[in-house]
Image (cartoon, rainbow, N blue to C red):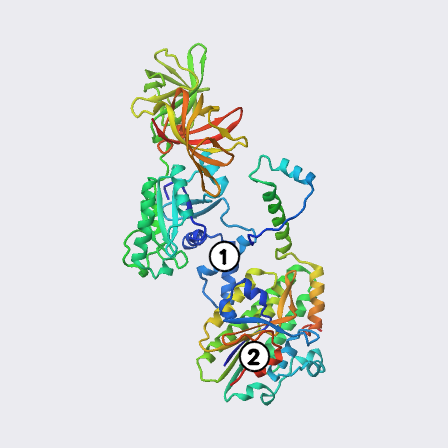
Amino acid sequence: MSKEYGDIKVSKEIIKKIEERIKDTEFKSVDEYVTFVLEEVIRDEEEPEEVFSEEDEKKVKERLRALGYLD
Amino acid sequence: MTDENLKFVIVGHVDHGKSTLIGRLLFDTNSLPEGKIEEIKQLCESLGKDIEFGYIMDHLEEERDQGITIDTAQTFFSTEKRDYVIIDAPGHVEFVKNMISGASQAEAAVLIVDAEEGVKEQTKRHAYILGMLGLSQVIVVINKMDLVDFDRERFEAVNSDLMEFLININIKPSYVIPISAKNGDFIASKTATMDWYDGPTVLEALDAFRTKENANKKPMRFVVQDVYSFDKRIIAGRVESGIIRKGDMIKVLPTGEKTRVKSVEEYLRNVTEAEAGKSVGITTEDKLFIDRGNVIVSDGDMPAVTNRIKANVFWMDRTPFKKGESLHFRCATQEVNCEIEKISRVINSSTLELINEDANEINNREVASIIIKTDKPVVVENFNKMEELGRFVLGREDTCAGGIITELE
Amino acid sequence: MIVLAIDALEYTLVEEFNCTNLKQKFYGKTNITEFSQPRTMVLWSSFMTGKNMEKEILAKGDKEMWNTRIELKDTFFSRFADPKIIDLPGFNYLKEQHEQERMLLKNYFDAQNIDEKNKIRTEYNNLAFEHHRKVKKEFTETLNSKHDFVLGYFSVADVVGHLNFGNRIMMKMIYKDLDEIAGTIKDSFIVLSDHGMEKVGIFGDHSNYGFWSTDFEDIGSPKITDFARIIKY
C-alpha cells in the first residue's frame, strides 16, 4: 500500500474506546489499530471467493447466454 | 536423526531475499507442506511445464499478499542430520520479547546481505540485535550473486565491508557463503557458477551449528526455594542444570560454605540423584545457614557472585523507566532490589533504530543495554554460558522487563 | 509481423502480475464501445476485416455464429505473401475443440450439486489446458519457420477464466505462461485481446475493453477495427 495518508474523522467516543482496548496490546496508537481493522475488513471483501455462490452463478449464466456461449 | 532440533533466525534488510531463502530452504529439502505445492504442480503439468522454484515463490508470495502466510512464527524443515525451525526475524516486536523472556529462543542466526546492494543500515541493525540477544552462532549469506554475475571480487568487497562492522560488535560468523536463493546456488547444492568458492553450502553450514548442550551435561546448579524443618532439615529447590547426587561435594552461594549432600529426597520415592528440571529436597551433612534465593553448586565450575551486571533488557511496561528508580531484580528464586547505574544504549525494538546513548529513560517496547547494581550479591551466569541463571526480570509490583546477562564484573 | 492474439487478456492483471513481455514498450486498452456486447466472434471478425461485423455475425444466430469462416481475401492477412494463422475465431477456429468446451460449460451450469459441478469443471479445465499445450507447440514451431505473418490465437485465459477467474493462483500461472510465450518471440510483435475479464465470484465475465501492446508505437486507445490498418507489411 502507498505510504501517503489522508484524514478521516472518527468520534472522540470511539477513539476513547479504542485507547482503552489497545492498552495492553502491541498496538502503539489508535491510528495503527484502526488501520489494522480496516485492512482486515477490506481484505475480506477482496478475497477470491472459492465458496460456491448461487447468485454469482445465475449472473454469469445470463451473461454467457448473452455472449453466445450458452443457448 | 540423532540431534535435537535447532532453532535459528534469518535477519537482514527486508529486500535482501529472506523470503526467497526460506522458500528455497523448504523447497530444496522437500519440506513444503504437500497441500501447498500440489496446486502448483498440477498447474505446471497443465501448462506443459516442469515445476520450478520460481512458481512456488510466486504462489507463496501471492498467499502472503492475501494474508495467508507460510512463515508466521515458525517454519520447519529437515536435513539428514536434524530438524530445523526458522523463527520469525527481528523487526517483529514479539520476536525480541520472546527471545529475551526465553519463550522461543533462536540458537543461531543467518544474516543475509544482497550482493548487488551491499551492506545497508538495516543489515547493521539486525547484526547488532544478534549481538545484543546473545546469539553467538552466526553465518552470513551474500545473496543474489546471480545479479553480479557470480563475481568473486564483488563478494569479497561486500564481505570485507560487513566484517568491518561485525568485528566492532564482536560477532564472528562461522561461515560467509555466496548464494543465489532464486537459482538455488549453494543453498542445498554446490553448483558450477562459483568454482572460486570452496566452502560449505548453507545446509552444510547449518548442520555444523551446535544445538544447546543438554542441560544435564552442564555444571550443577540447584536453586533453593525453601527450607523445611521436620524430623530433618530439608532444603527444597529446583535443579536448573546438571545432576545433583547423594555424596556430592557442594558449595552454597553467595556465602561460599561447603558441605556434602547427605540425601536427595523426592516425595514418596527413594532416590539418590536428581536431573536438570527436577524439583526435589536435599539434606546436607553439615548444618549451614541456607535460605531461599541461595544457589547450591558443585565444587568446580563456579558461577559469578556479584552485584554488578551488564545486561540487555526489553522494557515491557507502559510506564517508562527513569534513571534513579529502584526496581526488583529476580533471577531464578533470588530476589533483591537494584538500581540501573547506566543505560548505555536504547534501541527501538521494531525499527531497531538507535534512540539514545547514555540515556536517562527506557520506554515501552524498547531494548536497552544497561549496567545493573543489586543491593546484595547475586549468583548469576552469562546468558550464553547458562540461560537458567543468565535470564532475569525487573519489576515494580508487576514484571516490567525481561533481560539477559551479557557480562559480569 | 507477429500477432499474439490472446482472448480475454485483462489489462489490470497484466499490470498486477507484472507481465513485462506482454507489456512490451507501449501498452494500453482498446476501445470496443461501438459493439453492443463484447462477443468473441464479433470482435475477432471485425479485427481481421477492419470493419464492424456485429450485424452480420449476429444475424447468423448464437449457434451458427461459432461456425463463421471469413475468407482470406476479405481479411488484411491477404496483404502478406505467406500468412500463418492458428485457430483464430471467425477464420479457422477449431470447431470440435471449442464446441466441446461450450458443451462442458453448459453441463456445468446444468449440474445440480457442487460435487458434480467440480468434476465437470476439472474436465473443462483439462480440455482447455490440453488445447493450450498444443497451440503453444504449434506456435513455437511456426515462429521458426519462414512465414511473413504469423498470428497465434490463445484461448486459455478466456475458457479457463469463465469458470475460474476467482482462482488467483490459476490465473497468475496462466498469465505468467502467456508472458513467457511472449518472451520467446524475437521479432517485432503486437499483443491484442478482443476483450478483458472481470470477476464475478469465482467466475469471469467479459470486460468492456481489450488489451494491446507494441514495441514500436504508442497507439493510444485504438478500435479493434484499426489494426487492419496499423499492421503493415
Above or below, comparing residue B359 to residue C41 in the picture: above
Q: Quarter-wise, where is residue B108 in the image?
A: top left
SS state under label 2: loop
Task: Choose top left, top right, bottom left or bottom right for residue C48.
Answer: bottom right
Q: Residues within 10 Å of mark 2 (few under 14, many from 20)?
A: some
Along the viewing direction, whichever of B52 and B335 lies nearer the viewer:
B335
Question: What residue is pinned by disc 2?
Answer: C87
Residue A50, image x, y percentages:
62, 57
For label 1, the residue is B37
- For the point 44% across and 76% down, the residue is C186
Residue A61: x percent and y percent? 70, 67
Judge from the rendering whether residue B50 lies leftward or rightward of residue B142; answer left or right: right
2 vs 1, front mark: 2
Disc 2 residue type? Asp
Q: Chain of mark 1?
A: B
Q: Residues within 10 Å of mark 1 (few under 14, many from 20)?
A: some
Above or below, comparing residue B295 to residue B407 in the picture: above
Task: Evaluate whether residue B111 shows in this view.
Answer: yes
Helix, strand or loop at mark 1: helix
Question: Quadrant of the rendered structure where residue C221 is?
Answer: bottom right
Q: Chain of mark 2?
A: C
Q: Amino acid at mark 1?
A: Ile
Q: Decide: marks 2, 1 in contact (CB < 8 A)? A: no
| Residue B4 appears anywhere in the view | no
Which quadrant is the C terminus of chain B positioned in? top left
Query: Could you tell whether B283 is left or right of C41 in the image?
Result: left
Q: Which mark is residue C7?
A: none
Question: Percent position (x, y) of residue B48?
Answer: 48, 68
Q: Along the horizontal axis of the image, is B399 left or right of B278?
A: right
What residue is drawn where x is 62% and y is 51%? A6
